[in-house]
Each structure stands twice: as structure tokens, then as C-alpha cells.
Image: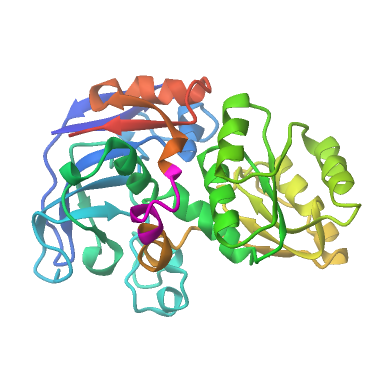
Amino acid sequence: MKSTMFMEPGKVEIEDIDKPTVQAPDDVIIHVVRTCVCGSDLWAYRGLEDKEKHSENTGHEAIGIVEEVGSDITTVQPGDFVIAPFTHGCGHCAACRAGFDGDCQNHTDNFSNGVQAEYIRFQHGEWALVKIPGKPADYSEEMLKSLLTLADVMATGYHAARVANVSAGDTVVVVGDGAVGLCGVIAAQMRGAKRIIIMSRHEDRQKLATEFGATDIIAERGDDAVAKVMAMTNNAGADAVLECVGTEQSNDTAMKVGRPGAIVGRVGLPHEPKMDMSSSFYSNTIIAGGPASVTTYDKQTLLKAVLDGDIHPGKVFTKSFTLDAIDDAYQAMTKREAIKSLVVVD
């Protein structure tokens, strides 16, 4: 089967490898229908973090058809159409019961890799997989795109809003205009925010953010951006902040734009070894966040919202590619020619 391999910074390639097989009783083999490139995949691709050459790629978002199940699987069967979250929660440990299945305590292999492929082995699939009614052919391409966002970015944006306790009437600042930040705008609106300020300097992302519910755009960065938020809020600051990038500057900005007692929901994958926490102490800023509770949110809220047409997160996919053109999909995001690259497998 075809699978994406990380060759070296700036290069991924398709290779023919063995099709995965059931190796444990709670494995599920899935025929991938749609996958995509995540912003976090670009860190190694851009040479900003170490990754072994000629290794399994980090792709981790997919929807597809169940092909085979292990002996312990009772919740899905061959032929089912499913969302394959990037997390593999068990549903019954303390973390999963509290709604934090991104931190499942029952196994160490809690995250997907290597799903930019024709088939994947999904570990611990009994609870984590999310069934979609019907078959892929029942849905438009636009709907398939939105369903795919429920494997990661829409759930991650929602996680930022949830842990930041975004509530009705709130003023929210979203730091980051990638797919997660844009989905954070959707999530903030879903949770009743009255004002949603997104930091974005790219016209295509600004337009989509506005379509998703952003009320204000800030193109500045750093202290200039902080000053603009304060001017917009009568020097009060935001009630909640969604940090959706993971850099030192984005975290610094997020810590400074909230009012005293604000919650910063951090979902940008951290790439800085240290963070100065002194300012948050004196402002009573609450820091929360981490890997998204994908299965919990999909089952409780997000799948229904997509199927009912209440939200359209699939609009973050602005370019489509075949699996054979996977390097082009990476390049499009690296060059900011696409907000998020869709990969059509079947």
C-alpha cells in the first residue's frame, strides 16, 4: 500500500509498504478516504525540530472505512464509516471520564502517526473511533471536509475554548490564524462569545475568520498587538484567550491580552523550552490546555453540529491533493498557499 515517509526536511515521499494488520485485540484496520496535513507536521518538514530521516510521517487526521477489527472490538464493524481521531482514549480511565481523553491514562500510545496512507492500524479503537452515519458516498465533498476536521483541528479549537471557559457574552482573543485558530473562532461563537478578536495578517484567513464569526481583526504582532487589544477593550483585556500557535511570542501575547483572572486555553503545540510565569501570577491568569479531547467533543457536540449544518469547519481546507502529490500538499502549506491541505485517498 501507499504510505507517506518523512525523507528529510523539505521532503516527504510516497513509498509502497506492507498493509497493516491486526496486532492486538483492540486494533482496527481502516481504509483511509480522506486525510490531510496539519500545521504541527510542518515543524519537522521546515527543519525546526529533529526527526529521523526516512521515518514514518507524523500525519494524524483521517476519516475512512473500517476494514477489519480485533477480537475485543464491539463498537464498530467492517463497513462502518468512522472518524479516526488523533487521540486514542479508552473512555473509562479517570482522564477520559473527566472529559480529557487526550490524556488517556490506560496506554502510552495515545496519539496517531502515519495516517497519510491508504490503510492505517488504529490502536485502542473500542471507544475512541467515532461512527459517521451512512457511507462516504452519502456526503458532499464539502461535508467530507468538515467531517475530517473532527479528527483534530475542529476538536482542538473547541478544546481551547472549553478549557478557557468561553461563556455567553465573553470577549475572546484568538492568537493564531491557522486551521486550529480559525476553528477556535467557530468554537467561541458556538459557546456564546459576544466579541471574538483574532490575530491575523493574511487576507484569506481574515476573510474566513470573519465568516466563522470573528468580530475584529488585529494584524499587529507582539506588544503592538497587546496594545491594540487593550485599546479595543477599554484597557480591560479579554475574558478568555485561545493560544493556537505554540511559539514563544504567541504564548507571551496570550498571557498579556487577558483581563485579571482570564483563562488562557493553550492548544498550540509548544516548541519553546521555557515560559516566564511571573506575569501570570500577578494578574491571576489561569493557564489551561493540552491535547484535545477529540472523541468526547465529537460524540457530545461536534459531529451533530456538522451533520446539522450548524458549523462548516471544512472551509479551512483551501487546496486538495492526491496522495501521490503529498509533497505538494506540504509545500502549499509551507508557502502559505493553502490554509490547510486536504489529501484525497479514495
- Say if 228 sits above or below 331 in the image: below
Q: Position of residue 172 (x, y in %)?
A: 70, 54
Q: Residue at x 26, y 47 (%)?
A: 63
- Image position of 280 (left or right of 208): right
Is residue 54 shown to the viewer in this render?
no
- Image position of 25 (left or right of 270): left
Q: Quadrant of the N terminus?
A: top left
Q: Position of residue 191 (x, y in %)?
A: 58, 62
- Image position of 45 (left or right of 61): right
Q: Residue at x 81, y 61 (%)?
A: 280
Quarter of image, res 139: top left
Q: Is 116 one of the magenta-colored residues?
A: no
Q: Quadrant of the C terminus?
A: top left
Extent of the magenta region: 304-313
Viewer-proximal residue among 306 and 182 = 306
Viewer-proximal residue among 149 and 67 = 149
- Image position of 200 (left or right of 328): right
Viewer-proximal residue among 47 and 97 = 97
